[in-house]
Image (cartoon, helix red, strand yellow):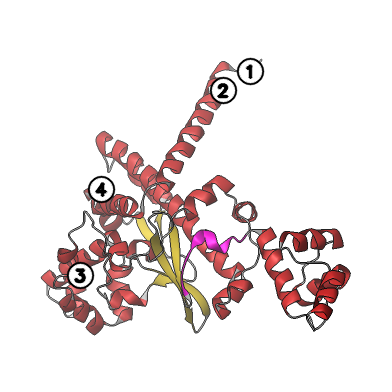
């Protein structure tokens, strides 16, 4: 006989998992501005600061092949022309002085002391190391926070798609080590939160926190898990897009985009197709060849095959039979299709058979 306490425990766990999935889905559907405000609120809370700076329980871990976009150091006034609830003028006022300070610091010092600061380092220590005033350090930190929240107002999307609003989250940049993801938001560039649970457990055991603080810590950790989940999901999607669609990023030729389904990616990184759909919804990347929506990197396999078929037919010196088209697709693109599939795609493209094309060519002579 099954222990009723165990059964109840299992049911409770299942209910909790369902609740967490719903909570995660809601987080994925947040706008980028709302998500950045959530991160800002968490990082500015006194409890987070205590766990990170004083107890050194929380730190950042950067994502592989990811960084902060070089455009951060430029802060060009690329502001959305459409009406907005954000005071655009206040966002861009008096930034040149701060940008100048950051440039004087150098990228390495900026990253070390401002973007990825060591836990426990004080504002006074940063000011001393960087030869700045304490007030200047505070202003730069405020700029980083503001820039994370208002990223899409500094780097607005230019995509117009039936009234949908897109958020441009990152640029794909070329470097000495190949292609990398350059996030516009410092909050993304910092990566995910890592919690030293063993150290935290010891602090809890030693009674460092009172009962109210313990409850607040649990709530904070849950928020960090959810934030990490969204950050991880987005970065995995972008990184896999870069790996899969390298031919496009290198050439800029839309015909170089390879067939890539959301289901295929979901299976590869251990997420559900619905999660992938939520992650890529209304988000875009800046590429060396212009801005593109994330969904564009998942071309329909059938559409992809039609494009290849058109390329073969556009280059034919004389009308090719479906069998010869089949061989050509295999040789040139490594795509294996049956002769029947080729005939079907050709008919959908309203392209006559090789015999009809031959007759048409003779008639036009």
Quadrant position of the C terminus in the picture: bottom right
**How far apart are the two marked residues, 4 and 1, measured between alpha carbons?**
42 Å
**How far apart are the two marked residues, 2 and 1, measured between alpha carbons?**
7 Å
Q: Secondary structure at mark 1?
A: loop
In the image, is residue 180 part of the stretch drawn in magenta? no
Q: Which residue is mark 1?
A: 2
Q: What's the mark number on residue 47?
A: 4
**How far apart are the two marked residues, 1 and 3, measured between alpha carbons?**
60 Å
Q: Which residue is mark 3?
A: 140
From where the camera sits, is residue 235 visible? yes
- Of 197 and 341, which appears nearest the observer? 341
Residue 165 relative to residue 342: left or right: left
- Please determine whether, in this image, residue 206 is positioned above or below residue 334: above
Quarter of the image where one finds residue 124: bottom left
Of callouts 1 and 3, which one flags the residue occurring earlier in the amino acid sequence? 1
- Of 316 and 360, which appears nearest the observer? 360
- Of 25 and 201, which appears nearest the observer? 25
- Please determine whether, in this image, residue 337 is positioned above or below residue 47: below
Where does the image place residue 158, in percent across and percent down from the top left?
38, 66
- Please determine whether, in this image, residue 220 is positioned above or below residue 183: above
Pointers 1 and 3 in contact (C-beta within 8 Å): no
Of callouts 4 and 3, which one flags the residue occurring earlier in the amino acid sequence? 4
Of callouts 4 and 1, which one flags the residue occurring earlier in the amino acid sequence? 1
Q: Residue at the spot x=22%, y=77% of the render?
A: 99
Q: Which region of the structure is painted magenta?
A: 290-299
Residue 266 relative to residue 209: left or right: right
Mark 4 burial class by Cα count in 10 Å: few <14, some 14-19, many 20+: some
Q: Which residue is mark 2?
A: 6
Pointers 2 and 4 in contact (C-beta within 8 Å): no
**How far apart are the two marked residues, 2 and 4, measured between alpha carbons?**
35 Å
Of callouts 2 and 4, which one flags the residue occurring earlier in the amino acid sequence? 2
């Amino acid at each position: 006989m099954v222990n009723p306490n165990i059964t109840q425990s299992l049911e409770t766990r299942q209910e909790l998992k369902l609740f967490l999935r719903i909570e995660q889905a809601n987080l994925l559907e947040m706008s980028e501005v709302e998500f950045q405000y959530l991160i800002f609120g968490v990082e500015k809370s006194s409890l987070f600061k205590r766990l990170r700076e004083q107890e050194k329980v929380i730190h950042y871990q950067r994502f592989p092949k990811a960084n902060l976009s070089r455009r951060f150091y430029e802060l060009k006034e690329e502001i959305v022309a459409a009406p907005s609830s954000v005071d655009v003028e206040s966002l861009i006022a008096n930034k040149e002085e701060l940008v100048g300070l950051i440039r004087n610091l150098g990228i390495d010092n900026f990253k070390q002391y401002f973007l990825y600061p060591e836990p426990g380092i004080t504002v006074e220590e940063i000011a001393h190391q960087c030869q700045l005033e304490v007030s200047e350090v505070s202003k730069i930190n405020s700029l980083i926070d503001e820039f994370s929240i208002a990223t899409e107002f500094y780097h607005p999307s230019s995509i117009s798609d039936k009234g949908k609003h897109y958020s441009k989250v990152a640029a794909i940049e070329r470097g000495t080590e190949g292609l990398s993801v350059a996030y516009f938001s410092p909050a993304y560039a910092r990566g995910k939160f890592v919690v030293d649970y063993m150290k935290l457990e010891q602090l809890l055991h030693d009674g460092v926190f009172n009962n109210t603080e313990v409850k607040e810590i649990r709530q904070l950790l849950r928020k960090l898990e959810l934030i990490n989940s969204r950050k991880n999901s987005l970065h995995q999607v972008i990184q896999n897009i870069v790996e899969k669609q390298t031919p496009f990023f290198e050439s800029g030729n839309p015909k170089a985009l390879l067939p890539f389904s959301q289901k295929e990616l979901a299976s590869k990184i251990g997420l559900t197709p619905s999660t992938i759909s939520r992650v890529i919804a209304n988000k875009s990347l800046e590429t060396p060849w212009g801005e593109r929506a994330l969904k564009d990197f998942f071309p329909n396999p059938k559409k992809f095959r039609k494009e290849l078929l058109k390329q073969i037919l556009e280059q034919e010196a004389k009308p090719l039979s479906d069998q010869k088209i089949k061989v050509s697709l295999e040789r040139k693109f490594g795509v294996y299709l049956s002769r029947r599939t080729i005939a079907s795609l050709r008919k959908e493209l309203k392209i006559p058979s090789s015999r009809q094309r031959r007759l048409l060519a003779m008639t036009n002579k």
